[in-house]
Image (cartoon, grey):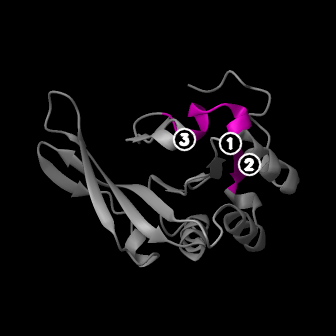
Amino acid sequence: MKLKEFSVDFDCNGMTPFFQVHQDNRVRFDIDALNMANLKLIINDIFNKDKQINAIVVSEYIVNNKRKSAKTRIGQVIHLKNWKEHVVLEEGTSDGIVYSTIGSLNPTDVYNYCLSVKKGLTRAYIAFHSNEYLLYVSSDVIDIISSNATNISKLKDRYNDFYDRYYEGNAHIYG
């Protein structure tokens, strides 16, 4: 699925959003290096209470026209509301992926989900986004993307001691 506001293709079979944007538009945090207080600060910084927060997640796989749950367990962490499905079929086949969008989330929902991933309790191909930021979380990293490079620069300054610099200076590593 194309997320136009961030110029990324949210595709569980492709590159993660982090590698689809220029280094000036992204920042990465090692999930194990963040303590709970810093995680909460970062999430509240990018998703303040005034912003509408949505999520996009792979909820099912379609194989031979049969749906199979991705077993995200997201409903155990976040109260699901405003759930919409978007079916993406591979060309010429009956296979595909069901991406679900979840609306009307809040920073606590994002924090609780990231914390459950950090603890190893849940894992899904998921991203949370507002009109300014996209936060992708996996078992290893939390990536934050913004179309506005100034937003990312401020985050890198504010969280200078915490962010992962492994891909800094590698401007050619994006699609």
Q: Residue at x 71, y 45 (%)?
A: 27
Q: Residue at x 72, y 40 (%)?
A: 149
Q: Give the spatial CA distance, label 1 vs label 3.
A: 9 Å
Badge 1: how crowded within 10 Å, few (<14), some, or many (20+)?
some
Q: Which quadrant of the rendered structure holds the C terminus?
A: top right
Q: Is residue 95 above or below residue 49?
A: above
Please give the residue where the numbered disc 2 appears in the rendered image.
151
Q: Give the spatial CA distance, label 3 vs label 2.
A: 13 Å
Are circles 1 and 3 on residues that touch, CB within 8 Å?
no
Residue 39 pos. (x, y %): 71, 66
Badge 2: how crowded within 10 Å, few (<14), some, or many (20+)?
some
Res 148 label = 1
The question of residue 28 being in magenta is answered with yes
Are circles 2 and 1 on residues that touch, CB within 8 Å?
yes
Q: Secondary structure at mark 1?
A: loop
User: In front: 131, or 152?
Assistant: 131
Q: Give the spatial CA distance, label 2 vs label 1.
A: 6 Å
Judge whether residue 123 can be spotted in this image.
Answer: no
Instruction: State which tag comes first along the sequence, 1 or 3.
Output: 3
Instruction: State which tag comes first along the sequence, 3 or 2.
Output: 3
**Magenta range:** 15-30
Amino acid type, callout 2: Asn
Judge whether residue 140 can be spotted in this image.
Answer: yes
Q: Secondary structure at mark 2?
A: helix
Q: Secondary structure at mark 3?
A: helix
Q: Residue at x 41, y 42 (%)?
A: 12
Left or right of 14 in this view: 137: right
Amino acid type, callout 3: Phe
Please give the residue where the numbered disc 3 appears in the rendered image.
6
* Total count of labels: 3
Q: Which quadrant of the rendered structure holds the N terminus?
A: top left
